[in-house]
Image: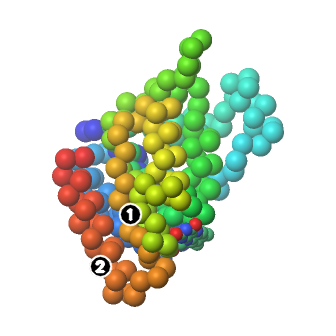
Amino acid sequence: MAKLVYIDACVRENDSRTRRIAEPIIKALGERYEISTFRLPEMNLEPLSPAAYAERAVKIVPEWAAEAARTIAEADRIVIAAPFWDMSFPSVLKVFFEQTSLFGITFDSDDKACYGLCKCKKVLYITTRGMDIPTGDPREQGTPYIKALSTLWNLGELETIAATNMDYSTPEEIEAKVSGCIAEGLEIARDF
Ligand SMILES: Cc1cc2nc3c(=O)[nH]c(=O)nc-3n(C[C@H](O)[C@H](O)[C@H](O)COP(=O)(O)O)c2cc1C
């Protein structure tokens, strides 16, 4: 069975509208993929400290990070669920990328440039935004960041599903947006 990595950065956990959109899409993808889930809010992630940085320089990395990086490198598809925070995504996701961006696992370099070691062909990024900011707007820095990381790690094409203006919508409008994004995601999941 092909492999899919699901990265859940929904800090509001079961209150998260982003997670509500992602879960049925992941369930549908589970019929065709073996899924490895990383629930970042439960992982007590910490940014690279001076001590950890010094260890990395002599090729010592935490075993969980090497293992997560290997799982990512071997995945055929990646799904990221992350709310829109401070014009991009929660820092726990950046910390996860920082910890798993490892020479010799997710990427490498020769004497000229860096190149990705991942085999993933498609990434699906699911988000909800409080303000009325569409994907591709210069104020939206989640999609461009993940696209850039995709070029470093070799993750293939990125598709973003986004519900917007969530903090200025009625409960009925929010429900309609969540349902619309689930339908969009299930459609994408058919040939993802
Ligand atoms: C800490 C924090 C930071 C946020 N920053 C932004 C922001 O910069 N721009 C924006 O449009 N909405 C922002 N929001 C609103 C969220 O994007 C919005 O409520 C989203 O639907 C939350 O997703 P969730 O229900 O999955 O947690 C922020 C919310 C929180 C809690």
Give ligand 1's quarter of the image: bottom right
Name the residue beneath numbered marker 2.
176
What's the coloring here?
rainbow
Amino acid type at image mark 2: Ala
In front of the other: 22 or 64: 22
Q: Is residue 47 above or below residue 2?
A: below
Mark 1 Cα shell of 10 Å, populated few (<14), some (14-19), many (≥20): many
Seen in the picture, residue 26 relative to 123 is either above or below; the reply is: below
Cα separation, mark 2 vs mark 1, equals: 13 Å
Q: Position of residue 38 (x, y in %)?
A: 48, 52
Q: Which residue is mark 1?
A: 162
Identity of the residue furthest to the top in this view: 111
Q: Circle 2 sits in a helix, a strand or a loop, which is it?
A: helix
Per the rendering, the mark at residue 13 is none
When the figure is inspected, residue 24 is found, relative to residue 145, above or below; the finding is below
Relative to residue 177, is residue 42 drawn left or right? right
User: Which residue corresponds to the image point at 43% horizontal and 54% vertical from the top-left?
Assistant: 136
Residue 126, percent across and down? 39, 59
* Residue 48 or residue 39, whichever sits in front: 48
Residue type at numbered disc 1: Ala
Q: Looking at the rendering, in which quadrant would you find the N terminus? A: top left
Image x and y of residue 18, in percent: 42, 67
State the image coordinates of residue 50 (x, y, percent, origin top left): 81, 39
Pick whichever of labels 2 and 1 is earlier in the sequence.
1
